[in-house]
Image: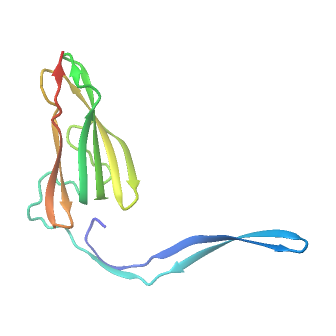
Amino acid sequence: YDVPFRGAVPFAVEGMASGRRSGGRRRGAFSISFSNSFRVEAKPVAIDVKPLSKDGQPDDFAGIVSDSLAFSERTDLKRVETNDVIQITYSLDATGSVPAGFRPEGVAFEMSREDVRGGATSVKWRRYFVADGERKTPKVSISYYDPQTKTYKRAEAGGSDVEYK
């Protein structure tokens, strides 16, 4: 889905159908449970995955493709003294593809990644920021491709106020 490809892709649908049948007779009631596995081979589907346009592609584009994206920051401290360490959690919720191993610049590590219903991906990263007199946390920016508008976009998080005691 993320590299150019042209060809037929076969697929199958598998599952299990289960049920219960109950009834009554002169000698008492009965209940029967049953389960049947199934597999249906479908005709191959012809697909043509084209590369993304290079027009307007940012230098930091890392392969995120999403038509709905939210990027936010949450800090564990708002009021600090100089040299306190603030834990920052960045959250990205994207309807589409977020490549495994992608990390925004400046983050320490990925905390969690979850595939959510509807083709969405939710990822959280952690960063540590030393309160060195700066009045705001660092801003982090990521670029992504929006397949609906067929354009590259940018999402930004950070810049939360830091108050010194």
Image color mode: rainbow
Front-most of 45 and 154?
A: 154
Residue plotted at (50% across, 74% down): 13
Residue plotted at (12% across, 25% down): 134
Q: Is residue 73 above or below residue 29?
A: above
Kindly tell me whether residue 98 is visible in this rendering: no
Q: What count of labels does the image hold?
A: 0
The location of residue 93, given as percent across then percent down, is 30, 51
The location of residue 38, given as percent across then percent down, is 59, 75
Q: Is residue 15 above or below residue 116?
A: below
The location of residue 21, given as percent across then percent down, is 73, 72
Residue plotted at (22% across, 21% down): 79
Quadrant showing the C terminus: top left
The location of residue 88, given as percent across then percent down, is 26, 33
Kindly tell me whether residue 132 is visible in this rendering: yes
Residue plotted at (49% across, 76% down): 12
Quadrant showing the N terminus: bottom left
Q: Is residue 35 left or right of residue 53?
A: right
Res. 29 image quadrant: bottom right
Front-most of 72 and 40?
A: 72
Q: Residue furthest right?
A: 27
Q: Residue furthest left?
A: 56
